[in-house]
Image: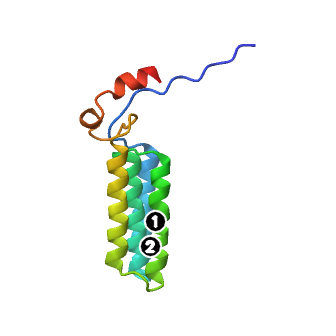
Amino acid sequence: MQTKEAPDPKFAPGFRLLKHDKWAIGIFTISTIVFWKASPLLSFCSFMAAAHFFLFCNVFRIRRLPELIWSAVFLTTVYLQSRGHLSLMTMVTVCELVALILIAVSIRQKDYHGILWKKFNPELESWWKLK
Protein backbone atom coordinates (compact mmCIF):
# COMPACT_ATOMS: atom_id res chain seq x y z
CA MET A 1 0.00 0.00 0.00
CA GLN A 2 1.42 3.35 -1.01
CA THR A 3 0.96 6.40 1.11
CA LYS A 4 0.81 9.82 -0.34
CA GLU A 5 3.28 12.29 1.11
CA ALA A 6 1.92 15.64 2.12
CA PRO A 7 3.13 18.34 -0.25
CA ASP A 8 5.61 20.85 1.10
CA PRO A 9 3.96 24.12 1.98
CA LYS A 10 4.87 26.60 -0.70
CA PHE A 11 7.08 29.55 0.07
CA ALA A 12 4.71 32.53 0.20
CA PRO A 13 5.94 35.17 2.65
CA GLY A 14 4.60 38.70 2.99
CA PHE A 15 1.10 40.09 3.38
CA ARG A 16 -1.63 37.45 3.11
CA LEU A 17 -5.39 37.67 2.75
CA LEU A 18 -7.25 34.38 2.38
CA LYS A 19 -10.95 33.74 1.82
CA HIS A 20 -11.60 32.83 5.46
CA ASP A 21 -9.76 35.99 6.56
CA LYS A 22 -12.21 38.05 4.52
CA TRP A 23 -15.10 36.25 6.23
CA ALA A 24 -13.61 36.91 9.67
CA ILE A 25 -13.13 40.60 8.87
CA GLY A 26 -16.74 40.79 7.68
CA ILE A 27 -18.07 39.11 10.82
CA PHE A 28 -15.98 41.36 13.07
CA THR A 29 -17.18 44.43 11.16
CA ILE A 30 -20.81 43.41 11.58
CA SER A 31 -20.33 42.61 15.29
CA THR A 32 -18.64 45.97 15.84
CA ILE A 33 -21.61 47.78 14.29
CA VAL A 34 -24.20 45.66 16.13
CA PHE A 35 -22.44 45.98 19.50
CA TRP A 36 -22.20 49.77 19.13
CA LYS A 37 -25.92 50.16 19.86
CA ALA A 38 -25.72 48.01 22.99
CA SER A 39 -22.32 49.12 24.27
CA PRO A 40 -19.74 51.36 22.61
CA LEU A 41 -17.07 49.78 24.84
CA LEU A 42 -18.00 46.26 23.71
CA SER A 43 -17.97 47.50 20.12
CA PHE A 44 -14.53 49.04 20.59
CA CYS A 45 -13.19 45.82 22.14
CA SER A 46 -14.54 43.80 19.22
CA PHE A 47 -12.85 46.19 16.78
CA MET A 48 -9.57 46.10 18.71
CA ALA A 49 -9.52 42.29 18.77
CA ALA A 50 -10.29 42.13 15.04
CA ALA A 51 -7.64 44.70 14.16
CA HIS A 52 -4.97 42.79 16.07
CA PHE A 53 -6.11 39.48 14.59
CA PHE A 54 -5.56 41.04 11.17
CA LEU A 55 -2.17 42.55 12.11
CA PHE A 56 -0.83 39.39 13.72
CA CYS A 57 -2.17 36.85 11.20
CA ASN A 58 -2.09 38.71 7.89
CA VAL A 59 0.33 41.61 8.06
CA PHE A 60 3.14 40.52 10.39
CA ARG A 61 2.25 36.80 10.47
CA ILE A 62 3.70 36.24 13.91
CA ARG A 63 3.84 32.95 15.79
CA ARG A 64 0.96 31.64 17.90
CA LEU A 65 2.56 32.23 21.33
CA PRO A 66 2.90 36.01 20.90
CA GLU A 67 -0.72 36.12 19.70
CA LEU A 68 -1.80 34.28 22.84
CA ILE A 69 0.28 36.58 25.04
CA TRP A 70 -1.40 39.62 23.50
CA SER A 71 -4.83 37.99 23.92
CA ALA A 72 -4.17 37.34 27.62
CA VAL A 73 -3.05 40.94 28.13
CA PHE A 74 -6.09 42.19 26.21
CA LEU A 75 -8.57 40.10 28.19
CA THR A 76 -6.93 41.08 31.49
CA THR A 77 -6.99 44.79 30.69
CA VAL A 78 -10.59 44.63 29.44
CA TYR A 79 -11.58 42.92 32.69
CA LEU A 80 -9.72 45.50 34.80
CA GLN A 81 -11.21 48.35 32.78
CA SER A 82 -14.72 46.93 33.18
CA ARG A 83 -14.20 46.83 36.97
CA GLY A 84 -13.05 50.44 37.05
CA HIS A 85 -9.40 49.67 37.84
CA LEU A 86 -8.04 50.99 34.50
CA SER A 87 -9.05 53.86 32.28
CA LEU A 88 -9.85 53.09 28.66
CA MET A 89 -6.75 55.03 27.62
CA THR A 90 -4.54 52.93 29.91
CA MET A 91 -6.10 49.72 28.59
CA VAL A 92 -5.44 50.73 24.98
CA THR A 93 -1.92 51.97 25.76
CA VAL A 94 -0.93 48.73 27.50
CA CYS A 95 -2.34 46.58 24.69
CA GLU A 96 -0.65 48.63 21.97
CA LEU A 97 2.72 48.64 23.75
CA VAL A 98 2.56 44.86 24.18
CA ALA A 99 1.61 44.48 20.49
CA LEU A 100 4.55 46.66 19.42
CA ILE A 101 6.98 44.69 21.60
CA LEU A 102 5.70 41.35 20.31
CA ILE A 103 5.93 42.51 16.69
CA ALA A 104 9.44 43.91 17.25
CA VAL A 105 10.58 40.59 18.74
CA SER A 106 8.85 38.60 15.99
CA ILE A 107 10.46 40.44 13.08
CA ARG A 108 13.86 39.50 14.47
CA GLN A 109 13.15 35.75 14.38
CA LYS A 110 14.82 33.54 11.76
CA ASP A 111 11.39 32.40 10.54
CA TYR A 112 9.82 35.87 10.22
CA HIS A 113 7.77 35.85 7.02
CA GLY A 114 5.39 38.80 7.29
CA ILE A 115 5.33 42.16 5.56
CA LEU A 116 8.77 43.59 4.71
CA TRP A 117 10.35 40.17 5.27
CA LYS A 118 13.11 40.93 2.73
CA LYS A 119 14.20 43.91 4.80
CA PHE A 120 13.95 42.28 8.24
CA ASN A 121 14.86 38.71 7.30
CA PRO A 122 16.75 38.55 3.99
CA GLU A 123 17.93 34.97 4.73
CA LEU A 124 14.38 33.60 5.02
CA GLU A 125 14.39 31.86 1.65
CA SER A 126 17.61 29.97 2.48
CA TRP A 127 16.26 29.06 5.91
CA TRP A 128 12.99 27.84 4.35
CA LYS A 129 14.82 25.52 1.92
CA LEU A 130 16.85 23.97 4.75
CA LYS A 131 13.76 23.50 6.91
Q: Disc 2 on helix, strand or loop?
A: helix
**Type of amino acid under label 2:** Thr
User: Residue beneath label 2, please?
Assistant: 77
Q: Position of residue 63 (x, y in %)?
A: 45, 45
Q: Residue furthest bottom?
A: 84
Residue ID at (44%, 26%): 10
Residue 108 is situated, as x and y percent measured from the top left of the image, at: 33, 41
Furthest residue to the top?
1
State the CA–CA distance, disc 1 to disc 2.
Answer: 6 Å
Taking the spot 43% from the left edge, 81% from the top edge, the residue there is 39
Q: Label 1 amino acid?
A: Val
Q: Secondary structure at mark 1?
A: helix
- Please state the horizontal and vertical placement of residue 8, each as a whole percent of the image: 51, 23
Query: Residue at horizontal 50%, vertical 56%?
Result: 68
- Label total for image: 2
Q: Pointers 1 and 2 in contact (CB under 8 A)?
A: yes
| Residue carrying label 1 | 73
Please, is residue 62 above or below residue 5 in the view? below
Write the residue at 69% across / 17% down: 3
Q: Position of residue 41 (x, y in %)?
A: 40, 78
Front one among 9 and 94: 94
Instruction: Classify 10 Å Cα crowding around label 1: few (below 14), some (14-19), many (20 and above).
Output: some
Q: Quadrant of the N terminus?
A: top right
Residue toward you, 29 or 52? 52
Disc 2 packing (10 Å; few <14; some 14–19; many ≥20): many
Within the image, what quadrant is residue 42 found in? bottom left
The image quarter containing residue 129 is: top left
Q: Is residue 111 positioned above or below 105 on the image?
A: above
Q: Nearer the viewer, residue 62 or 43?
A: 62
